[in-house]
Amino acid sequence: MEGAVTNLLCRGDKAIVVRGGKFGERWTEICQAYGVEALNIDVEWGRAVDPAQVEALLKKGPDIRAVFTQATETSTGVRHPIKEIAALVSSREKTVMVVDAITGIGVFDIPTDAWKLDVVVTGSQKALMLPPGLAFASMSEKAWGFAKRSDLPKFYFDFAKERKNLAKNQGSYTSPVSLILGLRAALARIRQEGLENVFARTEKMACATRAAVKALGLELFAPDSPSPCLTAVKVPKGIDGEKITTVIRDRYGVAIAGGQEPIKGKIFRIAHTGYINSYDVITGLVALESTLRDLGYTFTPGASVQAALSVLSE
């Protein structure tokens, strides 16, 4: 993400930032750190941005150099309409479209060339099924043109330097060999299953999880534009949300995530991507029911599992 800013822009440039969660805010923080003026579109957490908001800012600012957004806002479980936003940007020669797809690549189809996404970044620790430590960025020819004029400081994250070394089949600095070998194995697994099958499996697990939490009387945090990567769920009234993640981990051996910043203790997040399979989803739901029961929440036992199995068996 930092390299996408420092390799494309100059100090004083203007950039639109879709800010609908913790990682949208991070785009702004990176821009500010390098003297780029961030024009924020603040979106209610749990909602997707309206492309019309981006269009309105683009019309007002012919000097806007970039649009930064997420494919999935991981902190809220929202999927943003990156295809529609890119369609607004692609015709503007002096503006690039930059997407944080850390919880998008390998989760759902993101055809970078067809959608004219100039820069797409991702990481190893989500759908690529590896530990943290590898970062990836794709660059369009339009983006490489921006890189030639960029005057922001960069050293380790110098994309031009990295591109030159990649032509020699090597990195610019010491490579994390074990992670790269792991990446080869992960990509082979994805290829064996088939990308379309990976996307379909992930979507089905997402639908099953949403149906399951609804069967427990719980509400989705992102009901209108949920990402297949994870399901964000509102903590029911009267329950300590921060205890949900600790109890389910310490008593039942299942890890889920809580909310961040203003929604800390108000939501919890269940992942269903990468190497997670249907059995993991069911196991997680059993652990969730047990946790909610322990914390005093009343529901019909087994309701989530039955609802999920109904979807998974289709």
Image (tube, rainbow, N blue to C red):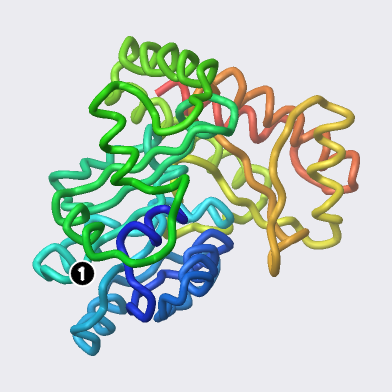
Q: Position of residue 20 (x, y in %)?
A: 50, 68
Residue 183 relative to residue 192: left or right: right
* Front residue (pair 287, 64): 64
Q: In the rendered view of the protein, which quadrant contains the C terminus?
A: top left
Residue 92 vertical placement versus 293 (above, below): below
Quarter of the view holding residue 51: bottom left
Which residue is at a point 56% across and 33% down the rendered structure image? 133
Q: Position of residue 127 (x, y in %)?
A: 46, 31
Residue 272 relative to residue 265: left or right: left
Residue 227 vertical placement versus 252 (above, below): below
* Front residue (pair 219, 106): 106
Which residue is at a point 75% across and 57% down the rendered structure image? 236
Residue 139 vertical placement versus 240 (above, below): above
Disc 1 target residue? 95
Q: Position of residue 41 (x, y in %)?
A: 42, 78
Q: Is residue 281 visible?
A: yes
